[in-house]
Amino acid sequence: MSATNYISKVVPNAAAAIEGLENDMTVMFGGFGLCGIPENSIAAIRDKGITGITCISNNAGVDDFGLGLLLQTRQIKKMIASYVGENDEFERQMLSGELDVELIPQGTLAERCRAAGAGVPAFYTPAGYGTEVAEGKEVRVFNGKPHILEHAFDAPFAFVKAWKGDKAGNLIFKGTARNFNPMMAMAGKITVAEVEELVEVGELDPNSIHIPGIFVQRIFQGVDYEKRIEQRTVRAKSE
């Protein structure tokens, strides 16, 4: 792609990036723990007051950061996740019945995202067979082993965070911040990417690009990123 022959996906800020997101929609959020989460997009959704969100994410952030901010304001109606152990408010809402929760195996979560991006409507997996995860789902036996039918996600919006991106939407993720972001970037009907550094087309090494711009509809450069440590563990000072 030449530096002059491309469609710019750039929007000015997070507020513009969430245009079209409405109440009661299903939304994907990339990240794992506090690593690689779309902080600016989450803040914009909170500020706009969008409610009734069905949230697909590996986890729910912590009480005062990440998706925990949307839980505080009761903007999430249902949480589809694989791990939620770091959020006291999440636990309170789930146990009180205020929040609908669907916990699924992490590999199944990843594959339901990947399948959506690949155009695969459903797949069979042995994960969860014999547990509550399998209740009400079709079961088939392959090579003597029971598998349950899981469906690809259907999300109008996906919000992801990348390290670098160009104006055509090509993305590079850094280290473990790659996590769920590439799969969700491919799965959303409208994928919004916020990046730490937005560059001109042609500045990224084509061999280093993790997600090509064809999967991204909107991109903006984020601001004020906070590099938090989810569980800070230190060694006692030696005598």
Image (cartoon, grey):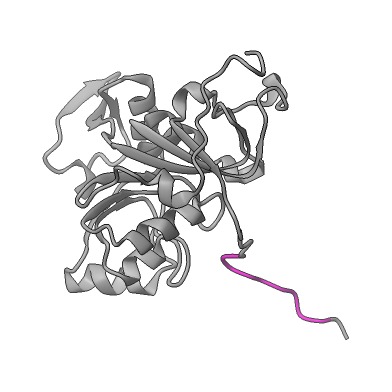
Is 33 located above or below residue 120 in the figure? below
In the orientation shown, which residue stands out farthest toward the left?
136
Q: What secondary structure predominates along the stretch shown in magenta?
A: loop
Left or right, 128 with respect to 7, comes to left
Position of residue 214 measured from the top left corner of the image (x, y, whole percent):
47, 21
Query: Which residue is located at x 85 percent, y 81 percent?
Result: 238
Q: Quadrant of residue 212?
A: top right
Image quadrant occupied by the N terminus: top right
Residue displayed at 31% across by 45% down:
27
Q: Position of residue 157 (x, y in %)?
A: 34, 39
Give whichever of 155, 168 is nearer the camera: 168
Closer to the camera in the image, 50 or 182: 50
| Direction from residue 166 to residue 51 in the image, left or right | left
| 65 drawn magenta | no
Q: Is residue 139 visible?
A: yes
| In the depicted structure, whether residue 50 falls above or below residue 156 | below
Q: Which residues are magenta?
A: 229-237
- Image-based side of 95 in relation to 60, left or right: left
Q: Position of residue 197 (x, y in %)?
A: 66, 43
Q: How many marks?
A: 0
Where the C terminus falls, by quadrant? bottom right
